[in-house]
Amino acid sequence: MVKVLLSDDAPQFKKITEEQALCWIHDARNYKKLEPIVPLHKKELEDFQSHYWKYYRQLLQFKENPTQENAERLSAEFDELVSTKTNYQALNERIEKTKENKSELLLTLKYPEIPLHNNDAELGARSQVRKRDVSLHTMTKEGTKASDTFMTIVQTAKKLGVSAYDYIGDRVSKSFKMPSLAELIYCKI
């Protein structure tokens, strides 16, 4: 079983991991969906979002130098952030949902090595989805496996700053002058 998984709040992820961290970017998108009409509500939403992103930047700083003292301070500041009450009921309801996800959103205080968002993983998957949209599908299981393998190599090389063309050429020619992607990933950990 996976110990910690960073994801959006989809329920299917809760069954495959001991602890689930939630993506701050996904949580923040819910505030962007609010469309207040009353000027006071617009101002309250803007103010809350400003405090939200200020707090997020503090979490990023924490990850650089995690201490128990800072973890406790940030936990208390989260409580203060989500205790905000406004005249905008939809905003209050959204804040309450963020409050309910405290343990998942603040799992980085326990595991500073996990990212605060999963956008990098989603961007990697997006290229496969785009290819599927254009190509529809492969004709055989072997073709699907080959396509998935190739896309994985290309996207992994891209994230590691390696030329996928050079890497595949190195492997096909069997010169092995370049380190494997697995070695490069291990070096980044």
Image: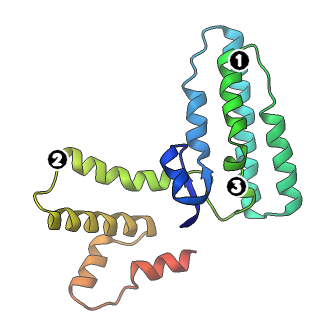
Disc on the earlier residue, 2 or 1 = 1
Labelled disc at residue 43: 1
Name the element at disc 2: loop
Closer to the camera in the image, 12 or 72:
12
Left or right placement of residue 86 versus residue 125 in this view: right
Q: Is residue 98 left or right of residue 16?
A: right
Secondary structure state at the residue bearing disc 1: helix
Say which amino acid is labelled 2. Answer: Leu
* Residue 164 placement (x, y as % from top left): 31, 71
Can the viewer see residue 118? no
Q: Residue at x 63, y 61 (%)?
A: 114
Side (left or right) of 161 relative to 21: left
Query: Badge 3 is on which residue?
Result: 107
- Left or right: residue 3 compared with residue 177: right
Q: Amino acid at mark 1?
A: Lys
Question: Which image quarter holds the C terminus?
Answer: bottom right
